[in-house]
Each structure stands twice: as structure tokens, then as C-alpha cells.
Amino acid sequence: MKLRTVVLVILLVIFADQALKIWVKTSMYYGGHITIFKDWFRLYFIENAGMAWGWKFGGDFGKLALTLFRLVAVIFGVFYIKSIVKKEYHRGFIICVALIFAGALGNLIDSMFYGLIFDKGMTIDKLTGDNMGYVGLATMNFKGYGSFLHGNVVDMLYVPIIENKIMPGWVPFIGGQSFTFFSPIFNLADAAISVGVIAILIFQKRFFKEVPATATPTVETNAVESDEKHVL
């Protein structure tokens, strides 16, 4: 696979991810949702200051550390992708790595720059540690709601396949309680990372197929050996 093909895959993922994030942030109110297909696929606008899938990571210091970690990982990813392309790894593996890289870079862009270019963003209550939304639509006017490396990641994809159902009473510990199957809200960058990782796990035997060792060739000659040479 050529490096330019890998770059094209990465650019397509980043473009789609950022285009959707910017549209959602400038067109939807925080906490608002739009039904796309019946009740199991919605755009649900939230932001998170932590890891993928809305996980949190240690307040402001944790967020800074996480952003720097993402930056280091992306820099390492550039060299790693160039290496596996040069070494002609399996095409499928290279595509998976490109998806993971694109996803990490997509969320890194949010963390690095969204706090600078948008005027409104989610904040964190220092007493409770809970996310706090904001009123009104955000605009891209470069006034900034935060500092460099302190932007929030925009999430919007919500796929509750089973939502607000009551767990049967016979189920231990959670019987009779309401539950939702697949409740995380994520973005295209998160999806790209997940698809890349899952595909590598599923197809690892195909991606890393061992090449059988080549047998040592036997060289035949027309030389005639005398039996006397083998007698001590």
C-alpha cells in the first residue's frame, strides 16, 4: 500500500469528524438531540473533557496530561505508519492503524484548539466534578472559552438499541431497575478508533500470518566420490 493512500484515509476520517463536530456545536444547543432513525439512532450534543466515550480523567491536570499524551501518541503514530508502509505490512492492518491514528488526531484537534476558537464550551463544577453545559449556540469567533490544550471533545452519536427498559425482577442486584443497552455518546473519531482496534483483534491471524521457513536447498553435483574417502 502506498503512503498517499493511507494519508487519504486519514484525511477523509478527520474531515468527516471535524465537519460533523463543528456543525453540531454551531447548530445545536448543548444537551439537544435530533432523531435520525426511529428511536435508536440520534444526534445528542454533549461535550467531555476526558477520554473517549465520555470517560473522565483527573480534572484540569488530568485533562492537560491526557492531551499531551494524545499529542505524543500522534507524533509516534506518524513514524509508525511510515514504518509499516515501508515494510509492506498487510493492507488491512495498515488501514486499521490509519483509522486509529485518524481518530486520535481528530479528538486531539478538539482538545488543542476548540477552547480557543469557540466562544462557549462545557465547564466542570470544581466542587462536584460534574460537567456543566451552557446556554445558547456556540460560535466560531476565536474569542475562546478556554486555553490552549484545554478544549472539550464534542460528542454526538447516540445509539441506544434498548432504552429505558425495566430489568426482570429475577436478575440479581439490578432486577426491577431501568437500564439502557449501549448508552455511551461518542463521535466519529471514537468510532474510527474502535473499528480499527476491533478489526485488528478479529483479523490478527490474517494480518500477522507467519511466513513458513524456507528449506535449505540441496545442491546436486556430478562429482564422483570414491568409497575409499569414507574409510578411516
Image (spheres, grey):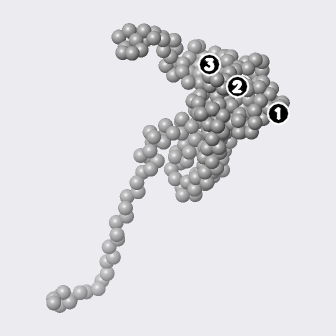
Q: Residue furthest left?
A: 231
Q: Which residue is pictured at 36% across the width and 15% down the height? A: 172
Q: Amino acid at mark 2?
A: Met
Instruction: Say which residue label 3 marks.
Output: 42
Of pointers 3 and 1, the one earlier in the residue sequence: 3
Q: Which residue is pictured at 68% across the width and 21% down the height? A: 132
Please state which of the two labelled residues, at mark 2 or mark 1, is closer to the viewer: 2
Instruction: Say which residue label 2 marks.
Output: 122
Q: Which residue is pictured at 58% across the width and 41% down the height? A: 100
Of pointers 2 and 1, the one earlier in the residue sequence: 2
The C terminus, quarter of image? bottom left
Of pointers 3 and 2, the one earlier in the residue sequence: 3
Q: Nearer the viewer, residue 87 or 162?
A: 162
Q: Characterize the local packing of mark 2: few (<14), some (14-19) or many (20 or more) Cα atoms within 10 angstroms.
A: many
Q: Which residue is pictured at 38% across the width and 9% down the height? A: 169
Rendering coords of residue 146 (x, y %): 75, 32
C-alpha gap between disc 3 and disc 1? 29 Å
Question: Element under label 3?
Answer: strand
Question: In the figure, residue 47 lies in which quadrant?
Answer: top right
Please state which of the two labelled residues, at mark 3 or mark 2, is closer to the viewer: 2
Q: Amino acid at mark 1?
A: Phe
Q: Nearer the viewer, residue 16 or 231?
A: 16
Rendered position, 114 above or below 41: below
Marker count (numbered): 3
Instruction: Say which residue label 1 marks.
Output: 142
Q: Characterize the local packing of mark 1: few (<14), some (14-19) or many (20 or more) Cα atoms within 10 angstroms.
A: few
